[in-house]
Image: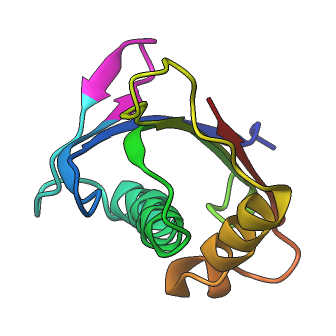
Amino acid sequence: MTSPRQFQFRLQSEHQHPGGTSSDLTVQWLNPEGSWEPQQLSLTMPGFRIYLISLLLCQHHYLVANALERELPLQRVETEFGVTAADNWILQSVRGRFRVILNVADGTGQSPQVAQTDLDYIKERMQACPVSRNLPPGVDKFTAVDVT
């Protein structure tokens, strides 16, 4: 029996104001040689990697949309995303850590305060993204959203 398959991704997005829409988004994949490679979806990319990137992008989209709904002034989102699959490609675990950097626009140099209820709401909504909802039963899921 072979060992589980590990996949690591990084995502970074920059956001413009007003509206906080993504002005720049990059996704990188940690290749088997241990180097980070930029990812551009294409027909030549392995389908399983496209699936994993779609999971990452779906959660990111829901984070951004719900942060904007809660009127959080996004400046940047940095994400570390790891997936473990069995040797037969069935997902076992999905772990995402999303670091949200808020825009300090009031001139005080202090980040706006974010209520725990807002963070809990955003995390709950991220799990409702269609790709997350279609994960197989039994997949260990962990999502963290930290604000700085």
Relative horizontal placement of residue 145, taking residue 129 as reference (left or right):
right
Report x, y in % for residue 120: 80, 65
Residue 97 picture quarter: top right
Magenta-colored span:
28-37
Examine the rendered structure and indicate whether residue 27 appears above or below residue 129: above
For this orientation, the residue located farthest to the left is: 43
Q: Which residue shows up at 39% across the image and 66% down it?
A: 54
Q: Which residue is drawn at 59% across and 40% down?
A: 112
For the point 73% across and 59% down, the residue is 119
How many numbered discs? 0
Q: Is residue 56 above or below residue 78?
A: below
Q: In this view, does 42 lie to the left or right of 127?
A: left
Give percent across and percent down for residue 104: 43, 30
- State the residue in front, 137 or 2: 137
On whether residue 29 falls in the magenta region, the answer is: yes
Q: Position of residue 102 (x, y in %)?
A: 48, 38
Q: Would residue 83 be counted in the magenta stretch? A: no
Vertically, is 40 above or below 18?
above
Q: Quadrant for the N terminus, please.
A: top right
Q: Is residue 17 visible?
A: yes
Which of 1 and 130 lies nearest the eye of the viewer?
A: 130
On the image, the x and y values in percent for residue 32 come to: 45, 22
User: Residue 43 versus residue 145: which sits nearer the camera?
Assistant: 145
Image quadrant in which the C terminus is located: top right
| In the displayed structure image, the side of residue 27 where residue 124 appears, left or right | right
